[in-house]
Amino acid sequence: MPRDPVQAKGLLLASIRDPNPVIFFEPKALYRNAEGEVPTGDFCLELEKAEVVSPGKDITLISYGNLMRTLETVRQLAEKDGISCEVIDLQTIYPYDAETLINSVKKTGRCIVTHEAPSTCGMGSEIASILQEKCFLNLKAPVTRITGYDTPFPLVQEPLYLPTEWKIYDKVKKLMNY
């Protein structure tokens, strides 16, 4: 699930060329907020490989797709308070790059996983479980999820349902003081 047009091209070409079945999720918001120069030549990204978009040392923020814009805003807000956020784009929801996530959380000791889907049975549950298991002795605070609510919602109320920069930033500050 790409975060911008560059990832959309690289992940789509990799998905087409992969011999296994691949479901490619394309956020509609990507078209409204498109920015960045897309390479004109042949360009593939490695499937199942997360990208560390912004290195940091205090807390790991993990997401994918359109929420990556929100995490960039959170990173900037936290930076003003002296908090260094490592921002990771999963790029591939499943299978995902557990190694990159584990290495990051072992380094920072704190982690927030966020996605637009409901909390129950969402991808964040799987990631939080693996990180809690593999990074337990390195954690300074519990692995935390910020997700959509466990209820259907009308499109008009999407801003109330989705994780926002303020919900995430508030949790960053709480985890830093845990």
Image (spheres, grey):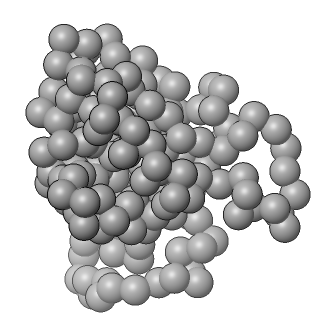
The answer to whether residue 146 shows anywhere in this view is: yes
Residue 161: percent from left, percent from top: 72, 52
Which residue is pictured at 44% across the width and 43% down the height? 171
Task: Estimate the x, y position of residue 114 in percent, counting from the top left.
Answer: 49, 44
Residue 93, position as x, y percentages in the image: 45, 41
Question: Where is residue 66 drawn, in percent x and y?
Answer: 51, 63
**Residue 103 appears in the rendering:** no
118, above or below 34, in the image:
above
**In the picture provided, is 106 more to the left or to the right than 164?**
left
| Residue drawn at 17 percent across, 19 percent down | 138
Residue at (21, 53) in percent of width and height: 83
In this rendered view, identify the residue nearer to me: 74 or 81.
81
- Quarter of the figure with residue 13: bottom left
User: Would you say 146 lies left or right of 19 here?
Assistant: right
Q: Nearer the viewer, residue 94 or 83?
A: 83
Image quarter where the C terminus lies is top left
59 or 94: which is nearer to us? 59
For the point 34% across and 16% down, the residue is 132
Q: Please indicate whether residue 105 sits to the left or right of residue 167 in the image.
A: left
* Residue 8 versus residue 51 in the image, above or below: below
Residue 5 lies in what quarter of the image?
Answer: bottom left
Number of labels in the image equals 0
